[in-house]
């Protein structure tokens, strides 16, 4: 009677395969996480832009043209009541989806715009960095046009896709 050899995988071969899978995973997971975070922040920046446009449109329908409101009252009296808000203060509103809209005055402020920064994931979460989870917009007081400002303009011009030079700042 002839003996048949049984072929099997040795313990050493299994361990080597697991080590290789572990090394490849440890290199791929950070890159994948960075990619998904970039996509999420870009989507949230676009959502903030559309939310701000919707708020301006709703406020215009209810209160009339934005140009009839004094510049220092635009955020608190004109825009803030049109947000679907969770919390609000004098110069900020946090929406139900966690975005925090804040009126601010940049160093190069002008009297033709109101400036708003948006922390798309709320101020409690990181990275709290301009161009990542903090986006900047300005609203033209003459006609209510919402425009991206500062680093958000780069994202807007790139069809809401992060270019590497913006993400790596």
Image (cartoon, rainbow, N blue to C red):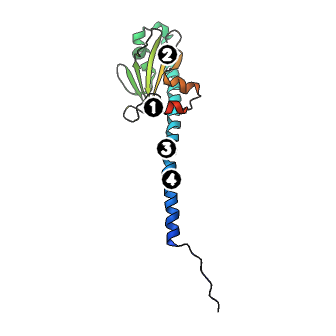
Separation of marks 1 and 3 at Cα, in angstroms: 15 Å
Q: Residue furthest left?
A: 89
User: Residue 66, position in %: x, y?
Assistant: 49, 11
Mark 3 vs 4, N-terminal side: 4
How many angstroms separate mark 1 from mark 4 (CA)?
Answer: 27 Å
- Pointers 2 and 4 in contact (C-beta within 8 Å): no
The percent position of residue 62, horizontal first and vertical second, equals: 49, 15
Residue at 50% over, 18% down? 56
Q: Nearer the viewer, mark 3 or mark 2?
A: 3
Q: CA distance from mark 3 to mark 2?
A: 33 Å
Classify 10 Å Cα crowding around label 3: few (below 14), some (14-19), many (20 and above). few
Q: Which residue is mark 2?
A: 139
Of discs 2 and 4, which sits in the foreground? 4
Does dot 2 land on a helix, a strand or a loop?
A: strand
Q: Secondary structure at mark 3?
A: helix
Tell how many labels.
4
- Circle 1 residues within 10 Å: few <14, some 14–19, many ≥20: many
Please state which of residues 1 and 121 is positioned toward the viewer in this rendering. 1
Q: Earlier in the sequence, mark 1 or mark 4?
A: 4
Eye-nearest disc, 3 or 4: 4
| Foreground tag (1 vs 4) | 4
Q: Which residue corresponds to mark 4? A: 25
Q: Are marks 2 and 1 in contact (CB under 8 Å)?
A: no
Which circle's residue, 3 or 2, is located before the other in the chain? 3
Vertical side of 122 occupied by 56: above or below: above
Residue assigned mark 3: 33
Residue that label 1 marks: 133
Real-space Cα separation, disc 2 to disc 1, in angstroms: 20 Å
* Residue 41 location (% of width, % of height): 49, 34
């Amino acid at each position: 009677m002839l003996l048949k050899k049984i072929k099997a995988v040795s313990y050493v071969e299994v361990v080597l395969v697991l080590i290789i899978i572990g090394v490849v995973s440890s290199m791929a997971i950070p890159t994948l996480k960075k990619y998904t975070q970039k996509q999420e922040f870009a989507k949230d920046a676009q959502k903030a832009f559309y939310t701000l446009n919707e708020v301006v449109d709703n406020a215009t329908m209810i209160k009339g043209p934005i140009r009839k409101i004094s510049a220092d009252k635009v955020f608190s009296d004109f825009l803030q009541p049109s947000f679907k808000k969770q919390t609000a203060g004098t110069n900020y509103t946090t929406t139900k989806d966690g975005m925090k809209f804040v009126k601010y005055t940049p160093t190069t402020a002008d009297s033709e715009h109101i400036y708003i920064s948006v922390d798309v994931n709320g101020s409690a979460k990181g990275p709290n960095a301009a161009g990542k989870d903090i986006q900047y917009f300005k609203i033209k007081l003459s006609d209510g046009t919402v425009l991206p400002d500062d680093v958000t303009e780069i994202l807007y011009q790139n069809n809401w896709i992060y270019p590497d030079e913006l993400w790596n700042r």
